[in-house]
Amino acid sequence: MQGEIVDKNSVIPIYYQLFKYFEKQIRSGQLQPGDALPTEMEIAARFDISRMTVRHAIGELVSAGMVYTQKGKGTFVARPRLDSVVFNLNNFYDEIRQKGMKRHSELLEARIIKADEKLAKRLGIDINTRCLYFRIVITADGEPLAYETKYTVYTKRSPILESELKDPSLSNLAASHSDTIPSSSKRVLMVSTATEEEAAVLGVSHDTPVFLMVQTIYNAENKIIAWGKSIFRGDRYKLTSYEGWNVENIKNN
Amino acid sequence: MQGEIVDKNSVIPIYYQLFKYFEKQIRSGQLQPGDALPTEMEIAARFDISRMTVRHAIGELVSAGMVYTQKGKGTFVARPRLDSVVFNLNNFYDEIRQKGMKRHSELLEARIIKADEKLAKRLGIDINTRCLYFRIVITADGEPLAYETKYTVYTKRSPILESELKDPSLSNLAASHSDTIPSSSKRVLMVSTATEEEAAVLGVSHDTPVFLMVQTIYNAENKIIAWGKSIFRGDRYKLTSYEGWNVENIKNN
DNA sequence: CCTAATTTGTTGTATATACATATATAAATA
DNA sequence: TATTTATATATGTATATACAACAAATTAGG
Protein backbone atom coordinates (compact mmCIF):
# COMPACT_ATOMS: atom_id res chain seq x y z
CA MET A 1 0.00 0.00 0.00
CA GLN A 2 0.96 3.62 -0.36
CA GLY A 3 2.28 5.45 2.66
CA GLU A 4 3.08 2.29 4.57
CA ILE A 5 5.89 2.39 7.10
CA VAL A 6 8.08 0.31 4.87
CA ASP A 7 7.51 0.29 1.14
CA LYS A 8 9.05 -2.78 -0.41
CA ASN A 9 8.82 -1.32 -3.88
CA SER A 10 10.55 1.92 -2.98
CA VAL A 11 14.01 2.68 -4.29
CA ILE A 12 14.96 3.42 -0.70
CA PRO A 13 16.31 0.27 0.95
CA ILE A 14 13.95 -1.43 3.37
CA TYR A 15 16.51 -1.49 6.16
CA TYR A 16 16.98 2.25 5.81
CA GLN A 17 13.25 2.96 5.90
CA LEU A 18 13.06 0.90 9.07
CA PHE A 19 16.05 2.70 10.56
CA LYS A 20 14.44 6.06 9.88
CA TYR A 21 11.15 4.83 11.34
CA PHE A 22 12.71 3.94 14.67
CA GLU A 23 14.95 7.00 14.66
CA LYS A 24 11.85 9.14 14.38
CA GLN A 25 10.12 7.27 17.17
CA ILE A 26 13.11 7.80 19.44
CA ARG A 27 13.75 11.43 18.58
CA SER A 28 10.10 12.32 19.00
CA GLY A 29 9.98 10.64 22.38
CA GLN A 30 7.42 7.99 21.42
CA LEU A 31 10.13 5.54 22.36
CA GLN A 32 11.84 6.67 25.53
CA PRO A 33 15.21 5.71 26.99
CA GLY A 34 14.97 2.27 28.52
CA ASP A 35 11.99 1.25 26.40
CA ALA A 36 12.29 -2.05 24.61
CA LEU A 37 11.93 -2.27 20.87
CA PRO A 38 9.78 -5.09 19.55
CA THR A 39 11.77 -8.28 19.10
CA GLU A 40 13.46 -8.84 15.79
CA MET A 41 11.03 -11.60 14.98
CA GLU A 42 8.05 -9.41 15.79
CA ILE A 43 9.33 -6.58 13.61
CA ALA A 44 10.06 -9.01 10.80
CA ALA A 45 6.58 -10.48 11.03
CA ARG A 46 4.82 -7.15 11.32
CA PHE A 47 6.43 -5.70 8.21
CA ASP A 48 6.75 -9.01 6.40
CA ILE A 49 10.48 -8.77 5.94
CA SER A 50 13.30 -11.08 6.92
CA ARG A 51 14.94 -10.99 10.32
CA MET A 52 18.35 -10.24 8.78
CA THR A 53 16.96 -7.06 7.24
CA VAL A 54 15.60 -6.06 10.63
CA ARG A 55 19.04 -6.71 12.13
CA HIS A 56 20.59 -4.49 9.48
CA ALA A 57 18.36 -1.60 10.55
CA ILE A 58 19.00 -2.22 14.24
CA GLY A 59 22.72 -2.35 13.53
CA GLU A 60 22.52 1.16 12.14
CA LEU A 61 20.66 2.33 15.23
CA VAL A 62 23.36 0.79 17.40
CA SER A 63 26.07 2.52 15.37
CA ALA A 64 24.25 5.79 15.85
CA GLY A 65 24.23 5.15 19.58
CA MET A 66 20.46 5.33 19.80
CA VAL A 67 19.81 1.77 20.95
CA TYR A 68 21.75 -1.02 22.56
CA THR A 69 21.19 -4.76 22.46
CA GLN A 70 21.42 -7.38 25.17
CA LYS A 71 21.77 -10.96 24.13
CA GLY A 72 18.87 -13.01 25.37
CA LYS A 73 16.91 -9.97 26.52
CA GLY A 74 16.15 -7.58 23.72
CA THR A 75 16.92 -4.21 22.17
CA PHE A 76 16.47 -1.04 24.19
CA VAL A 77 16.52 2.70 23.60
CA ALA A 78 19.77 4.13 24.95
CA ARG A 79 19.95 6.86 27.53
CA PRO A 80 21.59 9.92 26.00
CA ARG A 81 24.80 10.59 27.90
CA LEU A 82 24.42 14.24 28.75
CA ASP A 83 27.69 14.37 30.64
CA SER A 84 30.21 13.09 28.11
CA VAL A 85 30.51 16.12 25.94
CA VAL A 86 32.42 16.55 22.75
CA PHE A 87 33.11 19.89 21.19
CA ASN A 88 33.62 19.84 17.48
CA LEU A 89 36.22 22.29 16.32
CA ASN A 90 34.40 22.68 13.06
CA ASN A 91 31.93 24.93 14.84
CA PHE A 92 34.76 27.41 14.97
CA TYR A 93 34.49 27.73 11.23
CA ASP A 94 30.92 26.64 10.56
CA GLU A 95 29.58 29.37 12.75
CA ILE A 96 31.05 31.96 10.45
CA ARG A 97 29.47 30.32 7.46
CA GLN A 98 26.09 30.02 9.13
CA LYS A 99 25.95 33.72 9.72
CA GLY A 100 26.23 34.21 5.99
CA MET A 101 29.68 35.66 6.29
CA LYS A 102 32.46 34.67 3.98
CA ARG A 103 35.54 33.16 5.47
CA HIS A 104 38.84 34.09 3.95
CA SER A 105 42.38 33.03 4.70
CA GLU A 106 45.00 35.66 4.09
CA LEU A 107 48.63 34.67 3.93
CA LEU A 108 50.64 37.39 5.62
CA GLU A 109 54.01 35.75 5.25
CA ALA A 110 55.52 32.52 3.95
CA ARG A 111 59.23 31.97 3.82
CA ILE A 112 62.10 29.65 4.48
CA ILE A 113 63.82 30.10 7.81
CA LYS A 114 66.55 28.37 9.73
CA ALA A 115 65.38 26.73 12.91
CA ASP A 116 66.49 28.36 16.10
CA GLU A 117 66.82 26.39 19.28
CA LYS A 118 63.17 26.76 20.29
CA LEU A 119 61.79 25.75 16.91
CA ALA A 120 64.29 22.92 16.51
CA LYS A 121 63.02 21.49 19.74
CA ARG A 122 59.39 21.85 18.70
CA LEU A 123 59.90 20.13 15.37
CA GLY A 124 62.35 17.61 16.75
CA ILE A 125 65.07 18.60 14.30
CA ASP A 126 68.58 20.03 14.43
CA ILE A 127 69.28 23.71 14.87
CA ASN A 128 69.73 25.65 11.62
CA THR A 129 67.79 23.09 9.59
CA ARG A 130 65.71 24.85 6.99
CA CYS A 131 61.96 25.01 7.68
CA LEU A 132 58.91 26.82 6.36
CA TYR A 133 57.27 29.59 8.28
CA PHE A 134 53.70 30.79 7.69
CA ARG A 135 51.65 33.59 9.16
CA ILE A 136 47.95 33.53 8.35
CA VAL A 137 44.97 35.67 9.25
CA ILE A 138 41.46 34.31 8.98
CA THR A 139 38.88 36.96 8.29
CA ALA A 140 35.12 37.08 7.86
CA ASP A 141 33.81 39.97 5.82
CA GLY A 142 37.11 41.73 6.31
CA GLU A 143 37.12 41.43 10.09
CA PRO A 144 40.06 39.45 11.49
CA LEU A 145 38.94 36.50 13.58
CA ALA A 146 41.97 34.30 14.02
CA TYR A 147 45.72 34.56 13.72
CA GLU A 148 47.82 31.51 12.96
CA THR A 149 51.54 30.84 13.07
CA LYS A 150 52.70 27.60 11.50
CA TYR A 151 55.98 25.79 10.91
CA THR A 152 56.62 22.76 8.75
CA VAL A 153 59.72 20.82 7.85
CA TYR A 154 61.10 21.51 4.37
CA THR A 155 62.16 18.05 3.28
CA LYS A 156 60.31 17.95 -0.02
CA ARG A 157 61.70 21.25 -1.26
CA SER A 158 58.71 22.04 -3.40
CA PRO A 159 57.48 25.60 -3.90
CA ILE A 160 54.46 26.99 -2.12
CA LEU A 161 51.39 26.06 -4.11
CA GLU A 162 48.32 28.07 -4.92
CA SER A 163 46.19 25.34 -3.35
CA GLU A 164 47.83 25.84 0.01
CA LEU A 165 46.47 29.34 0.18
CA LYS A 166 42.94 28.04 -0.23
CA ASP A 167 43.38 25.38 2.47
CA PRO A 168 46.22 26.50 4.71
CA SER A 169 45.41 23.87 7.34
CA LEU A 170 48.44 22.55 9.10
CA SER A 171 47.90 19.01 7.84
CA ASN A 172 47.69 20.31 4.28
CA LEU A 173 50.84 22.37 4.64
CA ALA A 174 52.61 19.38 6.16
CA ALA A 175 51.47 17.17 3.30
CA SER A 176 52.82 19.67 0.80
CA HIS A 177 56.25 20.21 2.25
CA SER A 178 57.22 17.05 4.08
CA ASP A 179 58.51 14.05 2.18
CA THR A 180 56.44 11.90 4.54
CA ILE A 181 52.66 12.05 4.83
CA PRO A 182 50.70 13.27 7.86
CA SER A 183 49.47 10.40 9.97
CA SER A 184 48.42 11.71 13.36
CA SER A 185 47.63 15.00 14.97
CA LYS A 186 47.53 16.38 18.48
CA ARG A 187 45.66 19.52 19.44
CA VAL A 188 45.57 21.34 22.73
CA LEU A 189 42.99 24.04 23.40
CA MET A 190 43.74 26.59 26.09
CA VAL A 191 42.73 30.07 27.14
CA SER A 192 45.17 32.93 27.11
CA THR A 193 45.40 36.64 26.55
CA ALA A 194 46.46 38.25 23.32
CA THR A 195 50.05 39.38 23.07
CA GLU A 196 50.80 42.83 21.70
CA GLU A 197 51.48 41.43 18.24
CA GLU A 198 48.39 39.22 18.23
CA ALA A 199 46.19 42.02 19.51
CA ALA A 200 47.45 44.26 16.74
CA VAL A 201 46.75 41.74 14.01
CA LEU A 202 43.33 40.86 15.37
CA GLY A 203 42.39 44.45 16.03
CA VAL A 204 41.54 43.92 19.66
CA SER A 205 42.94 45.48 22.76
CA HIS A 206 45.88 44.01 24.60
CA ASP A 207 45.07 41.37 27.23
CA THR A 208 41.80 40.41 25.56
CA PRO A 209 40.97 36.78 26.41
CA VAL A 210 41.45 34.42 23.48
CA PHE A 211 41.36 30.75 22.60
CA LEU A 212 44.85 29.39 22.08
CA MET A 213 45.16 26.19 20.11
CA VAL A 214 48.44 24.38 19.52
CA GLN A 215 48.58 21.63 16.94
CA THR A 216 51.30 19.11 16.21
CA ILE A 217 51.35 16.88 13.13
CA TYR A 218 53.15 13.54 13.12
CA ASN A 219 54.03 11.20 10.27
CA ALA A 220 53.69 7.41 10.32
CA GLU A 221 57.02 7.10 12.15
CA ASN A 222 55.73 9.51 14.84
CA LYS A 223 58.21 12.19 13.86
CA ILE A 224 56.90 15.73 14.14
CA ILE A 225 56.58 17.27 10.71
CA ALA A 226 54.59 20.40 11.53
CA TRP A 227 53.71 22.63 14.43
CA GLY A 228 51.23 25.46 14.62
CA LYS A 229 49.64 27.93 16.97
CA SER A 230 46.24 29.52 16.45
CA ILE A 231 44.74 32.46 18.28
CA PHE A 232 40.96 32.79 18.10
CA ARG A 233 39.27 35.98 19.18
CA GLY A 234 37.36 35.26 22.36
CA ASP A 235 34.63 37.75 21.53
CA ARG A 236 33.88 36.09 18.21
CA TYR A 237 34.34 32.38 18.79
CA LYS A 238 32.50 29.86 20.89
CA LEU A 239 32.15 26.10 20.85
CA THR A 240 28.68 24.62 21.08
CA SER A 241 27.71 21.07 21.86
CA TYR A 242 24.33 19.36 21.85
CA GLU A 243 23.51 15.98 23.30
CA GLY A 244 20.40 13.88 23.43
CA TRP A 245 18.03 12.43 20.88
CA ASN A 246 15.73 15.34 20.17
CA VAL A 247 18.53 17.80 19.67
CA GLU A 248 17.08 19.30 16.53
CA ASN A 249 14.25 20.81 18.55
CA ILE A 250 16.42 22.73 20.98
CA LYS A 251 18.76 24.37 18.52
CA ASN A 252 18.39 28.10 18.15
CA ASN A 253 16.89 28.37 21.61
CA MET B 1 45.90 -24.93 12.20
CA GLN B 2 47.17 -23.11 15.24
CA GLY B 3 48.11 -19.46 14.94
CA GLU B 4 46.29 -18.93 11.69
CA ILE B 5 44.94 -15.48 10.93
CA VAL B 6 41.39 -16.68 11.49
CA ASP B 7 40.73 -19.68 13.65
CA LYS B 8 37.33 -21.15 12.86
CA ASN B 9 37.34 -23.20 16.05
CA SER B 10 38.09 -20.26 18.31
CA VAL B 11 35.46 -18.93 20.68
CA ILE B 12 36.24 -15.51 19.23
CA PRO B 13 33.91 -14.80 16.31
CA ILE B 14 35.46 -15.08 12.88
CA TYR B 15 34.27 -11.63 11.81
CA TYR B 16 35.94 -10.13 14.88
CA GLN B 17 39.24 -11.90 14.24
CA LEU B 18 39.13 -10.57 10.70
CA PHE B 19 38.30 -7.06 11.93
CA LYS B 20 41.26 -7.14 14.30
CA TYR B 21 43.51 -8.44 11.54
CA PHE B 22 42.78 -5.51 9.24
CA GLU B 23 42.80 -3.03 12.11
CA LYS B 24 46.32 -4.12 12.94
CA GLN B 25 47.39 -3.84 9.31
CA ILE B 26 46.07 -0.31 9.14
CA ARG B 27 47.38 0.91 12.47
CA SER B 28 50.82 -0.51 11.78
CA GLY B 29 50.93 1.17 8.40
CA GLN B 30 51.12 -2.02 6.35
CA LEU B 31 47.90 -0.81 4.79
CA GLN B 32 48.16 2.90 4.10
CA PRO B 33 45.44 5.47 3.46
CA GLY B 34 44.11 5.05 -0.05
CA ASP B 35 45.21 1.44 -0.31
CA ALA B 36 42.56 -1.00 -1.48
CA LEU B 37 41.62 -3.99 0.63
CA PRO B 38 41.28 -7.29 -1.20
CA THR B 39 37.81 -7.74 -2.64
CA GLU B 40 35.21 -9.39 -0.44
CA MET B 41 35.28 -12.47 -2.62
CA GLU B 42 39.07 -12.70 -2.42
CA ILE B 43 39.06 -12.42 1.35
CA ALA B 44 36.30 -14.98 1.61
CA ALA B 45 38.19 -17.38 -0.61
CA ARG B 46 41.54 -16.85 1.07
CA PHE B 47 40.22 -17.57 4.56
CA ASP B 48 37.56 -20.03 3.42
CA ILE B 49 34.69 -18.13 4.97
CA SER B 50 31.50 -16.74 3.53
CA ARG B 51 31.27 -13.34 1.93
CA MET B 52 28.63 -12.21 4.44
CA THR B 53 31.07 -12.83 7.27
CA VAL B 54 33.66 -10.76 5.46
CA ARG B 55 31.10 -8.00 5.05
CA HIS B 56 30.41 -8.13 8.79
CA ALA B 57 34.08 -7.51 9.52
CA ILE B 58 34.31 -4.72 6.95
CA GLY B 59 31.17 -3.17 8.40
CA GLU B 60 32.93 -2.88 11.74
CA LEU B 61 35.93 -1.26 10.07
CA VAL B 62 33.61 1.23 8.41
CA SER B 63 31.92 2.01 11.72
CA ALA B 64 35.33 2.61 13.24
CA GLY B 65 36.06 5.03 10.41
CA MET B 66 39.12 3.12 9.28
CA VAL B 67 37.92 2.14 5.82
CA TYR B 68 35.30 3.30 3.36
CA THR B 69 33.56 1.42 0.59
CA GLN B 70 32.66 2.46 -2.93
CA LYS B 71 29.98 0.53 -4.72
CA GLY B 72 31.35 -1.09 -7.83
CA LYS B 73 34.95 -0.19 -6.99
CA GLY B 74 36.16 -1.66 -3.73
CA THR B 75 37.06 -1.00 -0.13
CA PHE B 76 39.81 1.45 0.76
CA VAL B 77 41.73 2.55 3.82
CA ALA B 78 40.42 5.91 4.95
CA ARG B 79 42.55 8.99 5.34
CA PRO B 80 42.48 10.04 8.98
CA ARG B 81 40.63 13.33 9.09
CA LEU B 82 43.10 15.46 10.96
CA ASP B 83 41.00 18.57 10.56
CA SER B 84 37.64 17.55 12.02
CA VAL B 85 38.50 17.75 15.65
CA VAL B 86 36.43 16.90 18.64
CA PHE B 87 37.33 17.96 22.11
CA ASN B 88 36.00 15.76 24.84
CA LEU B 89 34.99 17.68 27.92
CA ASN B 90 35.88 14.71 30.05
CA ASN B 91 39.52 15.69 29.69
CA PHE B 92 38.66 18.55 31.95
CA TYR B 93 38.19 16.06 34.72
CA ASP B 94 40.26 13.11 33.55
CA GLU B 95 43.36 15.22 33.50
CA ILE B 96 43.09 15.82 37.19
CA ARG B 97 42.75 12.14 37.86
CA GLN B 98 45.68 11.26 35.63
CA LYS B 99 47.95 13.47 37.62
CA GLY B 100 47.13 11.38 40.66
CA MET B 101 45.22 14.21 42.26
CA LYS B 102 41.90 13.68 43.90
CA ARG B 103 38.94 15.60 42.62
CA HIS B 104 36.49 16.87 45.14
CA SER B 105 33.21 18.73 44.78
CA GLU B 106 32.41 21.07 47.60
CA LEU B 107 28.91 22.43 47.94
CA LEU B 108 29.19 26.03 49.04
CA GLU B 109 25.51 26.76 49.05
CA ALA B 110 22.22 25.06 48.20
CA ARG B 111 18.90 26.70 48.83
CA ILE B 112 15.50 27.52 47.54
CA ILE B 113 15.17 30.91 45.93
CA LYS B 114 12.47 32.82 44.09
CA ALA B 115 13.28 33.47 40.47
CA ASP B 116 14.04 37.03 39.59
CA GLU B 117 13.45 38.34 36.12
CA LYS B 118 16.81 37.22 34.74
CA LEU B 119 16.57 33.69 36.11
CA ALA B 120 12.91 33.36 35.14
CA LYS B 121 13.90 34.12 31.59
CA ARG B 122 16.77 31.63 31.64
CA LEU B 123 14.62 28.81 32.98
CA GLY B 124 11.62 29.79 30.94
CA ILE B 125 9.38 30.12 34.01
CA ASP B 126 7.39 32.84 35.75
CA ILE B 127 8.95 35.37 38.05
CA ASN B 128 8.90 34.42 41.74
CA THR B 129 8.55 30.72 40.98
CA ARG B 130 10.58 28.74 43.46
CA CYS B 131 13.82 27.22 42.17
CA LEU B 132 16.93 25.60 43.55
CA TYR B 133 20.24 27.42 43.61
CA PHE B 134 23.61 25.70 43.94
CA ARG B 135 27.13 27.00 44.26
CA ILE B 136 29.88 24.45 43.90
CA VAL B 137 33.65 24.53 43.96
CA ILE B 138 35.67 21.75 42.37
CA THR B 139 39.04 21.24 43.99
CA ALA B 140 42.02 18.98 43.41
CA ASP B 141 44.17 18.36 46.46
CA GLY B 142 42.60 21.38 48.08
CA GLU B 143 43.32 23.77 45.25
CA PRO B 144 40.20 25.29 43.66
CA LEU B 145 39.97 24.57 39.95
CA ALA B 146 36.42 25.39 38.93
CA TYR B 147 33.48 27.35 40.23
CA GLU B 148 29.97 26.42 39.27
CA THR B 149 26.64 28.16 39.67
CA LYS B 150 23.55 26.09 38.91
CA TYR B 151 19.81 26.54 38.93
CA THR B 152 17.12 23.90 38.58
CA VAL B 153 13.36 24.01 38.69
CA TYR B 154 11.81 22.78 41.94
CA THR B 155 8.80 20.88 40.67
CA LYS B 156 9.44 17.61 42.45
CA ARG B 157 9.85 19.21 45.86
CA SER B 158 12.17 16.54 47.16
CA PRO B 159 14.98 17.31 49.60
CA ILE B 160 18.59 17.58 48.52
CA LEU B 161 20.07 14.11 48.51
CA GLU B 162 23.44 12.92 49.67
CA SER B 163 24.04 11.44 46.21
CA GLU B 164 23.79 14.85 44.59
CA LEU B 165 26.82 16.00 46.47
CA LYS B 166 28.86 13.17 45.04
CA ASP B 167 27.68 13.85 41.49
CA PRO B 168 26.55 17.47 41.33
CA SER B 169 26.37 17.45 37.55
CA LEU B 170 23.62 19.60 36.15
CA SER B 171 21.83 16.66 34.57
CA ASN B 172 21.86 14.82 37.87
CA LEU B 173 20.55 17.82 39.76
CA ALA B 174 17.86 18.30 37.14
CA ALA B 175 16.88 14.66 37.41
CA SER B 176 16.58 14.95 41.18
CA HIS B 177 14.47 18.07 41.36
CA SER B 178 12.40 18.23 38.21
CA ASP B 179 9.26 16.15 37.85
CA THR B 180 10.29 15.52 34.24
CA ILE B 181 13.45 13.73 33.18
CA PRO B 182 16.43 15.32 31.38
CA SER B 183 16.34 14.63 27.68
CA SER B 184 18.71 16.99 25.92
CA SER B 185 21.55 19.27 26.81
CA LYS B 186 23.21 22.27 25.24
CA ARG B 187 26.66 23.45 26.19
CA VAL B 188 28.52 26.53 25.05
CA LEU B 189 32.22 26.95 25.73
CA MET B 190 33.65 30.44 25.69
CA VAL B 191 36.62 32.35 27.00
CA SER B 192 36.20 35.12 29.49
CA THR B 193 37.91 36.77 32.42
CA ALA B 194 37.18 36.04 36.04
CA THR B 195 34.85 38.40 37.86
CA GLU B 196 35.80 39.65 41.30
CA GLU B 197 33.69 37.00 42.98
CA GLU B 198 34.97 34.20 40.76
CA ALA B 199 38.56 35.27 41.19
CA ALA B 200 38.14 35.27 44.94
CA VAL B 201 36.67 31.78 45.03
CA LEU B 202 39.26 30.39 42.65
CA GLY B 203 42.13 32.16 44.32
CA VAL B 204 43.37 33.85 41.18
CA SER B 205 43.82 37.48 40.36
CA HIS B 206 41.06 39.53 38.80
CA ASP B 207 40.88 39.47 35.00
CA THR B 208 42.63 36.10 34.76
CA PRO B 209 41.52 34.35 31.53
CA VAL B 210 39.14 31.45 32.17
CA PHE B 211 37.00 28.94 30.34
CA LEU B 212 33.34 29.80 30.67
CA MET B 213 30.86 27.03 30.03
CA VAL B 214 27.11 27.51 30.04
CA GLN B 215 24.88 24.46 30.07
CA THR B 216 21.14 24.17 29.59
CA ILE B 217 19.15 21.01 30.27
CA TYR B 218 15.86 20.31 28.49
CA ASN B 219 13.20 17.71 29.14
CA ALA B 220 11.39 15.66 26.48
CA GLU B 221 9.01 18.57 25.83
CA ASN B 222 11.99 20.88 25.23
CA LYS B 223 11.25 22.89 28.35
CA ILE B 224 14.31 24.14 30.18
CA ILE B 225 14.60 22.43 33.54
CA ALA B 226 18.11 23.48 34.56
CA TRP B 227 20.71 26.08 33.76
CA GLY B 228 24.29 26.29 34.92
CA LYS B 229 27.47 28.27 34.50
CA SER B 230 30.97 26.87 35.08
CA ILE B 231 34.20 28.78 35.36
CA PHE B 232 37.38 26.77 34.78
CA ARG B 233 40.75 28.17 35.72
CA GLY B 234 42.61 28.88 32.52
CA ASP B 235 45.97 28.12 34.09
CA ARG B 236 44.89 24.66 35.16
CA TYR B 237 42.61 23.40 32.41
CA LYS B 238 43.21 22.46 28.81
CA LEU B 239 41.41 20.33 26.25
CA THR B 240 43.43 17.82 24.28
CA SER B 241 42.45 16.00 21.13
CA TYR B 242 44.19 13.28 19.15
CA GLU B 243 43.37 12.10 15.66
CA GLY B 244 44.75 9.50 13.31
CA TRP B 245 45.22 5.75 13.37
CA ASN B 246 48.36 5.39 15.42
CA VAL B 247 47.45 7.87 18.15
CA GLU B 248 48.57 5.62 20.96
CA ASN B 249 52.16 6.20 19.93
CA ILE B 250 52.12 9.98 20.07
CA LYS B 251 50.53 10.42 23.47
CA ASN B 252 52.77 11.81 26.17
CA ASN B 253 55.01 13.40 23.58
C1' DC C 1 39.64 6.72 -34.61
C1' DC C 2 35.87 7.66 -31.89
C1' DT C 3 31.52 6.43 -29.82
C1' DA C 4 28.15 3.43 -28.04
C1' DA C 5 26.92 -0.98 -26.39
C1' DT C 6 28.29 -4.97 -23.86
C1' DT C 7 30.66 -7.54 -20.58
C1' DT C 8 33.03 -8.10 -16.31
C1' DG C 9 33.98 -7.12 -11.62
C1' DT C 10 32.70 -5.00 -7.36
C1' DT C 11 29.84 -3.63 -3.44
C1' DG C 12 24.75 -3.27 -1.85
C1' DT C 13 20.32 -5.32 -0.59
C1' DA C 14 17.31 -9.04 0.72
C1' DT C 15 16.04 -13.62 1.87
C1' DA C 16 16.15 -18.24 4.11
C1' DT C 17 18.22 -21.25 7.18
C1' DA C 18 20.77 -23.34 11.04
C1' DC C 19 22.77 -23.34 15.18
C1' DA C 20 25.13 -20.84 19.31
C1' DT C 21 24.62 -18.28 23.45
C1' DA C 22 22.53 -15.60 26.97
C1' DT C 23 18.31 -14.63 29.84
C1' DA C 24 14.10 -15.45 32.07
C1' DT C 25 10.43 -18.44 33.20
C1' DA C 26 8.29 -22.75 34.34
C1' DA C 27 8.57 -27.36 35.87
C1' DA C 28 10.64 -31.09 38.32
C1' DT C 29 13.10 -32.67 42.21
C1' DA C 30 15.23 -33.07 46.75
C1' DT D 1 10.44 -24.50 50.44
C1' DA D 2 14.57 -24.23 48.06
C1' DT D 3 17.30 -25.84 44.36
C1' DT D 4 18.05 -27.77 40.14
C1' DT D 5 16.62 -28.76 35.55
C1' DA D 6 14.25 -28.12 31.52
C1' DT D 7 11.92 -24.96 28.25
C1' DA D 8 10.92 -20.91 25.82
C1' DT D 9 12.58 -16.62 24.03
C1' DA D 10 15.87 -13.32 22.65
C1' DT D 11 20.01 -11.78 20.23
C1' DG D 12 24.61 -13.41 18.00
C1' DT D 13 27.19 -15.86 14.43
C1' DA D 14 27.78 -18.11 10.04
C1' DT D 15 26.48 -19.81 5.62
C1' DA D 16 24.43 -19.94 0.94
C1' DT D 17 22.06 -17.74 -2.58
C1' DA D 18 20.06 -14.34 -5.77
C1' DC D 19 19.75 -10.22 -7.80
C1' DA D 20 20.46 -4.94 -7.96
C1' DA D 21 23.42 -1.01 -8.68
C1' DC D 22 27.46 1.02 -9.87
C1' DA D 23 32.20 1.43 -12.18
C1' DA D 24 35.57 0.25 -15.35
C1' DA D 25 37.25 -2.29 -19.12
C1' DT D 26 36.28 -4.47 -23.44
C1' DT D 27 34.12 -5.02 -27.67
C1' DA D 28 31.35 -3.76 -31.70
C1' DG D 29 29.97 -0.64 -35.02
C1' DG D 30 30.07 3.58 -37.54
Image (cartoon, coloured by chain):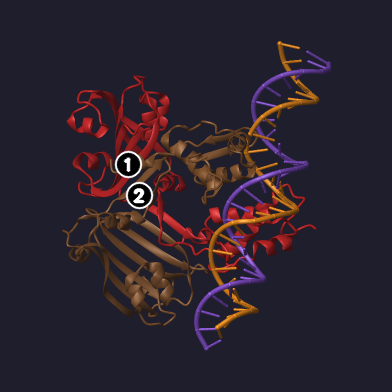
Chain colours: A brown, B red, C purple, D orange
Q: Amino acid at mark 1?
A: Ala
Q: Position of residue D2 (x, y in %)?
A: 72, 15
Q: Residues within 10 Å of mark 2 (few under 14, many from 20)?
A: many
Element type at mark 1? strand
In the image, what residue occupies the spot 40% across and 61% down?
A: B83
**Mark seen at residue B102:** none
Q: Are marks 2 and 1 in contact (CB under 8 Å)?
A: yes
Q: Position of residue B38 (x, y in %)?
A: 64, 66
The residue identified by callout 1 is B146
The residue identified by callout 2 is B237
Determine the image quadrant of residue B185.
top left
The subunit letter for the residue under badge 2 reads B
Marks 2 and 1 sit apart, C-alpha to C-alpha, by 9 Å
In the image, what residue occupies the spot 32% across and 41% down?
A: B146
Query: Image height check: is D26 above or below B64?
Result: below
A1 relative to C9 in the view: left or right: left
Q: Position of residue B42 (x, y in %)?
A: 69, 64
A167 relative to A53 in the view: left or right: left
Q: Amino acid at mark 2?
A: Tyr
Query: Image height check: is B197 above or below A131?
Result: above
Q: Nearer the viewer, residue A123 or B57?
A: B57
Q: Nearer the viewer, residue B58 or D25?
A: D25
- Residues tagged by mark 2 and mark 1 found on one chain of the structure: yes
Any part of residue B144 in sight: no
Q: Position of residue A241 (x, y in %)?
A: 36, 46
Q: Residues within 10 Å of mark 1 (few under 14, many from 20)?
A: many
The subunit letter for the residue under badge 1 reads B
Between discs 2 and 1, the one toward the N terminus: 1
In the image, what residue occupies the spot 35% across and 66% down?
A: A228
